[in-house]
Amino acid sequence: MGLMIYGADGYTGELIARLAAARGMPVVLASRDGEPVAALAKELGLPHRVFSLDDPAVVADSIRGTKAVLNCAGPFSRTAGPMVDACLRERVHYVDITGEVSVLEGLAKRDAEARASNITLLPGAGFELVPFDCLAAYVARKLPSATHLAVGLLPQTTVSRGSYLTMVEMAERGSLIRRDGELVRVASRGRSRRIDFGEGPRKSITIPFGDVATAFHTTGIRNIEVFVALPFGKRLGMRLSRWLVPKLTASARWKRWLHRQILKRPRGPSPDERARRVSHVWAEASDGTGATVRARLKTPEAYEFTSWVALDLGKSAALDALPVGFQTPGRVCDIDYMLRFPGVTVADC
């Protein structure tokens, strides 16, 4: 077997599984939940495996014989560690679609282990990190003297249930920036600035997206902030959540209630929404002397784009086509890679 898609019964995992089946790729589907993944595998005519990540021996035995695992089961703060342990033991390449800073930083520290096992560790192989990191590398190359980097997102999609659950965990920890090479928590109200994503300036606030981790490893720039553009109501909600969510999740009762509310939401964007909508990414590199480089990147809808790029990078890992050790999207991809996909454009601004 080549590539295993773990979490194939989740919203994003299923998109990737369906795309793999449509392309005739030799993948095996896997999940901790038996019935949904078995039904999907039967529909798509693909093999499947069922296993949780609780027992290291079971995980290792379950991935044995595969070339690479594409982990789509979040929150990745719970799944990445045990899956990577098994991949190191069995010499299986590891790819995931996380945007969680703690996971990205944790895997960066396992670079030597990955090299010793001759495997690739590539977290963040989806949206937002692939476009963020590639655009960050693009502006950094244009300004080698850069000391500061800012990256921004104008989202235009419905957030999946799994992404909401991850966002709740991120909100518990507050917002993060990179300052002088170190990750620093900022005030609950966050930082803000106006960013032009190509449709006029939008008020944007800092968010603890994964590029505060990956862009540092990709570019070496020691001061990094990541912004998201939101209307006033959502900005207010995010700022309140940074204060409220930690208080709610401290209570098991409120945490169960919050989980139930998330499960009432749509599973993810509809096929029509994925076909119609686009995402806008912006990056700025500056060196403190007035020299500044900015660029914009437009991609298809976030979950649609994730299915394309995650499957492509998972396939590359299964073919031993990626460098071994810990990697970031910006180390294995670039703007030219991004432009291979339909609907992707880049422009200096």
Image (spheres, grey):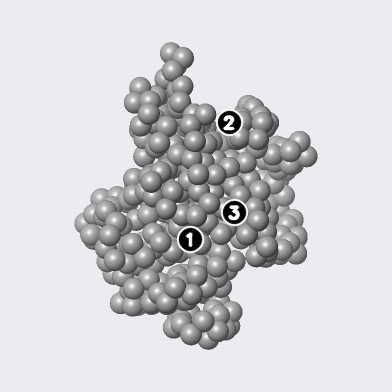
Residue at (71, 53) in percent of width and height: 251
| In the image, residue 18 above or below residue 329 | below
Q: Earlier in the sequence, mark 1 or mark 2?
A: 2
Q: Which marked residue is nearer to the observer: mark 1 or mark 2?
A: 1
Q: Which residue is mark 1?
A: 308
Residue at (28, 60) in percent of width and height: 321
| In the image, residue 172 above or below residue 239 | below
Under mark 3, the amino acid is Glu
Task: State the mark number for residue 186.
Answer: 2
Whole-percent x, y for residue 42 in the image: 53, 86
**Does residue 85 appear to the left or right of 349 in the view shown?**
left
Quick one: quadrant of the N terminus?
bottom left
Under mark 1, the amino acid is Trp
SS for tag 1?
helix
Q: Which residue is mark 3?
A: 301
> Dots 1 and 2: beta carbons under 8 Å?
no
Nearest the viewer among 49 and 46 is 46
Residue 221 figure quarter:
top left
SS for tag 2?
loop
- Judge the density around disc 1: few (<14), some (14-19), many (≥20) Cα neighbours within 10 Å: some
Whole-percent x, y for residue 147 in the image: 41, 23
Q: Which marked residue is nearer to the observer: mark 3 or mark 2?
A: 3
